[in-house]
Image (spheres, rainbow, N blue to C red):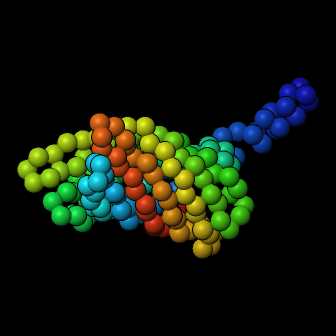
């Protein structure tokens, strides 16, 4: 019985709830859409919600809406699900990598289309205090059929 109690105590140190932490972020995302020599840069306001499963690994859901057009091109909406790997959560600057899947809806005049693709990127959270940080990030959103979408974003991140 004593061995079971010790094993249970040790196992609880490594349980998901020990590392679990939710976070919320708001980012201003500048999306660059390019096709050959043509490009446009509409802007998106993005909200993300994440769950830390370990000190390094998180799962995020993201949702964004267009807030500024570039000429005639508008980024209407953005939806994504990403896995994130954070390199060092105890540092003031925490770099991370992203891998996931996203869908971006674009419109030009009355025509619109959606682009979905495997997405990846990298960024860093820069600690303000124990609960909040500022965030910078680069993401490759889509690259298919001669159309490429990348983004650079900056924002605020709050851990619960």
Q: Is residue 56 left or right of residue 63?
A: right
Q: Is residue 93 visible?
A: yes
Residue 64 x, y percent position in the rendering: 32, 55
Residue 142 x, y percent position in the rendering: 37, 43
Q: Quadrant of the C terminus?
A: bottom right
Q: Is residue 20 visible?
A: no
As displayed, is residue 118 above or below residue 134?
above
Which residue occupies the foreground of this view, 143 or 3? Answer: 143
Residue 146 x, y percent position in the rendering: 30, 40
Image quadrant in which you'd find residue 102:
top left
Find the residue positioned furthest to the front. 37
The residue at the point 39 percent across, 52 percent down is 150
Q: Quadrant of the N terminus?
A: top right
Q: Is residue 139 left or right of residue 46?
A: right
The residue at the point 43 percent across, 54 percent down is 48
The residue at the point 85 percent across, 31 percent down is 7
The residue at the point 27 percent across, 51 percent down is 77
Image quadrant in which you'd find residue 11:
top right
Find the residue positioned furthest to the left. 110
Q: Is residue 135 left or right of residue 29?
A: right
Which residue occupies the foreground of this view, 63 or 14? Answer: 63
Image quadrant in which you'd find residue 117:
top left
Q: Is residue 102 left or right of residue 84?
A: left
Residue 139 x, y percent position in the rendering: 45, 52
Which residue occupies the foreground of this view, 19 or 96? Answer: 96
């Amino acid at each position: 019985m004593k061995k079971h109690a010790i094993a249970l105590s040790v196992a609880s140190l490594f349980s998901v709830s020990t590392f679990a932490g939710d976070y919320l972020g708001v980012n201003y995302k500048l999306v660059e859409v390019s096709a050959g020599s043509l490009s446009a840069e509409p802007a998106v306001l993005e909200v993300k919600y994440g769950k830390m499963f370990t000190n390094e690994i998180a799962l995020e859901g993201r949702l964004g809406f267009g807030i500024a057009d570039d000429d005639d091109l508008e980024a209407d909406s953005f939806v994504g699900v990403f896995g994130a790997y954070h390199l060092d959560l105890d540092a003031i600057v925490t770099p991370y990598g992203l891998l996931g899947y996203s869908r971006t809806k674009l419109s030009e005049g009355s025509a619109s289309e959606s682009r979905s693709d495997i997405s990846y990127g990298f960024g860093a959270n820069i600690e303000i205090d124990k609960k909040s940080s500022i965030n910078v990030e680069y993401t490759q959103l889509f690259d298919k059929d001669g159309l490429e979408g990348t983004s650079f974003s900056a924002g605020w991140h709050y851990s619960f």
